[in-house]
Amino acid sequence: VKHSFITVSLLVLLAGFISPVKKGFQIFGEAKGFADSTVIYLDDVVEGTYRHLDSTYIIKDKFYFEGNISGKYLRTFLRTEDLQHKCFLWLENGDIKVEAVKGAFNNAIISGSKIQDEQNILNAIIRDSKNPDDEEQNYVRNNPDAFLSSYLLNFYSASWGKEITENLFATLSRKNKKNEFGKGITEFLRLNKSPKIGEAFIDFTQKDTSGNKVKISKFKGKVFHLEFWGSWCG
């Protein structure tokens, strides 16, 4: 019994040492035409704003990032400091390969991410299209189970309008309707009343520059200018 107890204890102890460590992501990059020590940045752009994640140097046409994301995906942005060379990248935990050339960075060849594979297919479709919106809407309509479809519909819902968004949302798979982008679309459809010129405005509350909450209805009966602006916008 004593011998068995020692054996079991050793096995449990060893299991703690050899348990697999959760693998994060590695980006193996090639960027031809850049001077050594050119800095390249990695930003998170899932929410539509630029949140800096990391940066590294391009040395002998090569660059490398590593890390770990908590979710299944992250929409990121690879760029130089002056934003003259940039491309979007769907990041997942795993090995990602990026092949880019100075002057055509936006056409970088990216592989290693399932969602990026979906994006590559769409990019090829819209690259020479005269109506990118139509192609993207067709993609959503024809790929109801693709994760990218829910992202696209959520991202473009305001510009595509309620009617198109509602019709396309009905075609999405149940899984896509329930993910975070599907929930965003549901909220958009719930709140969007599509007011016309001359109709009563939809009241909302927003903090002013001093942090005080202000209701638009406070200005009722007055002429006022309302400007929507993002701090990330140049």
Image: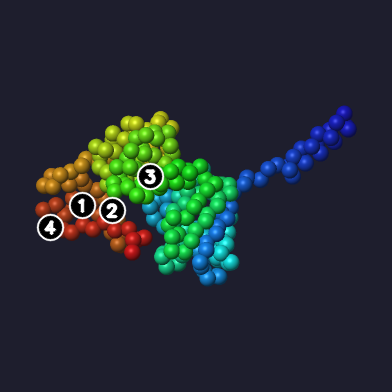
The one nearer the camera, 161 or 224, is: 161
Please report the residue visible at 32 percent of the width from the left and 47 percent of the height from the top: 129
Disc 2 secondary structure class: strand
**Residue type, mark 4 in image:** Val
Asked if disc 2 and disc 1 are in contact, CB closer than 8 Å, the reply is yes
**Residue 44 percent location from the top left of the image:** 46, 54
**Residue type, mark 2 in image:** Gln
Tell me which label, 2 or 4, sits earlier in the chain: 2
Q: Which mark, residue 223?
A: 4
| Mark 3 vs mark 1, CA separation in Å | 43 Å
| Mark 1 vs mark 4, CA separation in Å | 11 Å
Tell me which label, 1 or 4, sits earlier in the chain: 1
Q: Residue beneath label 2, please? A: 206
Q: Which mark, residue 94?
A: none
- In the picture shown, does residue 153 fall above or below 108? above
Please report the residue visible at 45 percent of the width from the left and 50 percent of the height from the top: 75
Q: Residue beneath label 1, please? A: 216
